[in-house]
């Protein structure tokens, strides 16, 4: 798939050169889909944060308004620990609902959990093209779309390889759709664009909380300096906020009335990201600036500096103002926040692609200027080529080099058949090396710890079997051999897997 996707990029380039823009766009979307399908082809759950999102989404299939991690916690838990609690409100529900719907339709497996991200990430390429075409011209939209097709950061997020994976992918889709609606409203003000902006804002909030406010901020930025009546603008702004609120409030009422302690804790926890370095995610203030070169190409700083430093680009039109806010607002807020995760700036990715594309179109015009010297022309051509090739190198690194050679590891194969090993009836698994994954692939609660005698007695009185994963020569297992079952390592002669050496 990566090779086919790269070949399609070449085809798209040739179609673009002969001005067949529709064909180039279709080929780009096909390449983007192939890249994302390839990245999503790991047959195991990634450690952060995909395994938690996938497990909660699995439980939402049956109870869509009760997000839980441990569906039936048999041990005491701290509701403030999102990695081991019961009711799970660490992320809003929309991305998880999409994952749950996909798994309901296509079965509980890794690819079904990733399918909504693969689709929405591909559609996001089209939205970036449409936004660039509306604000500037089709050439800007096509180049930006090509950069988004092959961006390694977005591939990682759609494939679940980076925190916060599918949540950030769905968020980026709604922000991109909101940005497109803002562009529509600038070309020709209309109420349907206002409705779309409001709906996107509400959906973005139900995906990842306060960052959704970026969408109305883009609308305000695009309107600066326009001559539209203030009363009409105020009515439109209030209408979009009312629509967003109408989407958000029912969920907030539901969680605060049914899960009050968890809802209060998580609401405060979100704001603590601004002033505290949580869970060890501490980086210097310039970390996002430093990551731009890695995630978007080392030479992307050139067009970004050109765009920011030019007063004309900054204030000339609604498109420039929109891109400026789309780039700088998340960059400034996340750089100032104490907690920093590498994927946070992905929400600004379409703005970066569009700025780079705008620069490339302008530089292409400079190359054709007869007043430009031969040396300057060669330098410009080299710069334009590297602006495309450096991100493509990172794509190949993510699709061909970074993934493990074993995309269906033995431990995942074992966990898929764990329920068959345990057998029917209520059971609790202990000594599981990957308890979250064990619960995704199976139906029994799983814990990494070993049970004590009191826990064994309490579970036995409820008619629950205690199953310890591992070997019978395990010292702690020998001490607890009364009242427990030890699931021995037994590889099947036919080539299938029971839990065996290495322990799930």
Image (cartoon, rainbow, N blue to C red):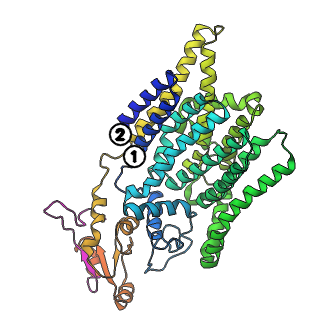
260 drawn magenta: no
Question: Are there few (<14), some (14-19), or many (20+) residues within 10 Å of tag 2?
Answer: some
Q: Distance between the Cα atoms at labels 1 and 2?
A: 8 Å
Task: Give the mark, 1 or 2, whose residue is nearer the N terminus.
Answer: 2
- In the picture as drawn, the residue positioned furthest to the bottom comes out as 461
Residue, x 56% and y 68% (percent of image)?
89
Q: Position of residue 338 (x, y in %)?
A: 65, 54
Is the residue under label 2 in contact with that under label 1 (CB below 8 Å)? Answer: yes
482 drawn magenta: yes
Residue, x 43% and y 44% (percent of image)?
36
Q: Position of residue 148 (x, y in %)?
A: 52, 38
- The N terminus - image quarter: top left
- Identify residue for label 1: 37
Q: Position of residue 240 (x, y in %)?
A: 73, 55
366 is higher (above) or lower (below) than 405: above
- Identify residue for label 2: 1
Q: Position of residue 33 (x, y in %)?
A: 43, 43
> From which residue to which does the magenta span run?
480-504
Residue 285 in view (yes/no): no
- Locate residue 394 relative to residue 425 in the image: left or right: right
389 is higher (above) or lower (below) than 42: above
- Locate residue 140 relative to residue 314 in the image: left or right: left
The main secondary structure of the magenta stretch is loop
């Amino acid at each position: 798939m990566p090779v086919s996707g790269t070949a399609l990029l070449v085809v798209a380039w040739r179609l673009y050169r002969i001005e067949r823009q529709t064909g180039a766009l279709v080929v780009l979307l096909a390449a983007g889909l192939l890249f994302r399908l390839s990245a999503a082809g790991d047959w195991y759950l990634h450690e952060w944060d995909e395994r938690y999102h996938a497990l909660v989404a699995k439980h939402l299939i049956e109870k869509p308004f009760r997000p839980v991690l441990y569906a039936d916690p048999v041990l005491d838990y701290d509701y403030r620990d999102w990695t081991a609690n019961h009711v799970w409100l660490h992320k809003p529900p929309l991305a998880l609902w999409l994952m749950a719907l996909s798994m309901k339709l296509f079965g509980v497996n890794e690819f079904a959990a990733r399918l909504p991200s693969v689709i929405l990430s591909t559609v996001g390429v089209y939205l970036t093209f449409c936004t660039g075409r509306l604000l500037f011209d089709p050439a800007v939209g096509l180049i930006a779309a090509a950069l988004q097709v092959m961006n390694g950061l977005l591939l990682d997020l759609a494939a679940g390889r980076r925190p916060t994976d599918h949540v950030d992918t769905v968020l980026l889709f709604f922000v991109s759709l909101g940005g497109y609606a803002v562009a529509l409203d600038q070309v020709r003000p209309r109420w349907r664009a206002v409705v779309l902006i409001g709906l996107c804002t509400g959906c973005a909030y139900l995906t990842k909380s306060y960052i959704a406010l970026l969408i109305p901020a883009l609308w305000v930025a695009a309107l600066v300096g326009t001559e539209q009546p203030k009363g009409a603008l105020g009515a439109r702004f209030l209408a979009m906020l009312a629509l967003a609120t109408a989407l958000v409030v029912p969920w907030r009422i539901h969680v605060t009335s049914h899960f009050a302690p968890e809802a209060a804790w998580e609401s405060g926890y979100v704001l603590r990201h601004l002033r505290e370095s949580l869970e060890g995610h501490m980086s210097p203030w310039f970390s996002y600036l430093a990551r731009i070169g890695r995630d978007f190409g080392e030479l992307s700083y050139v067009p970004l500096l050109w765009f920011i430093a030019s007063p004309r680009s900054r204030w000339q039109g609604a498109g420039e103002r929109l891109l400026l806010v789309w780039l700088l607002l998340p960059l400034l807020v996340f750089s100032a926040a104490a907690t920093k995760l590498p994927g946070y700036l992905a929400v600004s990715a379409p703005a970066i692609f569009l700025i780079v594309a705008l620069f490339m179109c302008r530089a292409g015009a400079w190359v054709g200027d007869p007043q430009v010297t031969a040396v300057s022309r060669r330098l410009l051509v080299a710069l334009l080529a590297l602006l495309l090739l450096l991100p493509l190198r990172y794509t190949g690194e993510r699709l061909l080099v970074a993934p493990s050679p074993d995309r269906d590891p033995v431990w995942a194969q074992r966990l898929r058949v764990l329920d068959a090993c345990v057998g029917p009836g209520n059971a609790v698994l202990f000594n599981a090396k990957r308890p979250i994954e064990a619960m995704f692939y199976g139906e029994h609660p799983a814990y990494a710890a070993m049970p004590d005698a009191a826990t064994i007695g309490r579970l036995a009185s409820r008619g629950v079997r205690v199953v310890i994963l591992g070997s019978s020569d395990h010292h702690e297992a020998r001490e607890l051999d009364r009242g427990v079952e030890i699931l021995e390592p037994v590889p099947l002669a036919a080539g299938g897997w029971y839990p065996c050496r290495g322990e799930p």
